[in-house]
Amino acid sequence: MDSLSERRKAILYLTLAAILWSTSGFFVKILNLHPISIMAGRSIFASIVFLIYLRRVPTRFNHWQLLAAGAFILTQFLFVTSTKMTTAANSIFLQYTAPIYIVLLAFWFLREKPSRTDWISMAVIFLGLILFFGDKLSVEGLYGNILAILSGVTSAVMMVAFRAQKDGNPAESNLIAFLVTATFGLPYLLGEAWTTDSLLILAFLGVFQIGFAFIFFTKGIKHIPALEANLIGTLEPVLNPIWVFLFYGESMGRFALVGGLVVLGGVILSAVGSAKAAKNGEAH
């Protein structure tokens, strides 16, 4: 299959991943469990999905594989903790400063230089995020804000480490992360009071929200530069409150709606620009 077709398929995979990631807000909001219990519970189900998908447990490890797994776990932990210490808007907005760090890391370690379209797309997306979260951002919760910024750094490291495995199987990093998270979070999980609803929600989060989502992500990241993959991923923070609004009734402001459309426009610009670049590359 030619590189342009692979690129289009990769963009579709990453878009599907972002849509599935975005469903966490609604379900986590109605789930009355400790955050670490949620992380552990969904990791158990996600581990099952990845074991079926990979049909093996990794026995050989390299530094990129372990770095991706470690950064994945740290990103989850820092984001959940920061959400407890500052506003949810601050947490997700500051985490999505990740493209700034990805530009540097991808250039230093992968020699992936951002194009002019990447820079323009990044500027458009940041403008959209400011509009989207602008009325909810605050300077309160200093330590939570710092953790959210750190989660952006670890998210960038995760993206680059996954991308560095483009000639291998980055899905193995996810399986390692899920197994570690499930093991360390098991004591919290066993101490919870269970209901059928909570079990079904955890199953959905594990199987679809991170299980299938990261299968799509690891398939897409093999053919898309780290920065572009992250820009497509910004659909997640925009769609997340939309699902909460539609199914939970939590209202959205006018600026949020405009900001969401701007972010969507930036993502489309990034995808179209990369497709044209790939087509021109093939022409040469």
Image: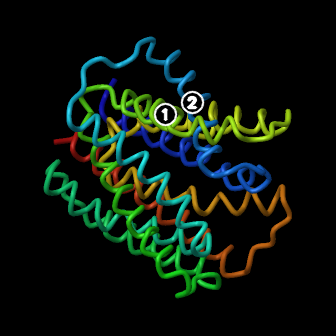
Task: Pinpoint residue 83: horizontal percent, then vertical percent.
Answer: 58, 66
- Residue 154, which numbered label? none
Q: Please name whichever residue, 112 or 109, is drawn nearer the observer in this view of the structure.
A: 109
Q: Distance between the residues labelled 2 and 1?
A: 7 Å
Q: Which residue is drawn at 50% across and 73% down?
A: 144
Name above or below for residue 221 compared with residue 59.
Answer: below
In terms of image quadrants, where is residue 223?
Answer: top left
Q: Please name whichever residue, 263 or 159, is drawn nearer the observer in this view of the structure.
A: 159
Tell whether 73 sits left or right of 40. Answer: left
Q: What residue type is labelled 2?
A: Ala
Tell whether 164 sits left or right of 144. Answer: left
Look at the image and tell me in which quarter the C terminus lies: top left
Tell whether 153 sits left or right of 48. Answer: left
Q: Which residue is drawn at 42% across and 37% down?
A: 10
Task: Pinpoint residue 264: horizontal percent, then vertical percent.
Answer: 55, 63
- The residue under label 2 is 46
Look at the image and tell me in which quarter the N terminus lies: top left
Q: Is mark 1 on a helix, strand or loop?
A: helix
Q: Residues within 10 Å of mark 2 (few under 14, many from 20)?
A: many
- The residue under label 1 is 178
Q: Which amino acid does label 1 sit on?
A: Phe
Name above or below for residue 141 compared with residue 235.
Answer: below
Q: Do the residues labelled 2 and 1 touch (CB within 8 Å)?
A: yes
Q: Looking at the image, is mark 2 or mark 1 earlier in the sequence?
A: 2
Q: Which residue is drawn at 70% across and 40% down?
A: 191
Q: Is mark 2 on a helix, strand or loop?
A: helix
Q: How crowded is mark 1: few (under 14 residues within 10 Å), some or many (20 or more)?
A: many
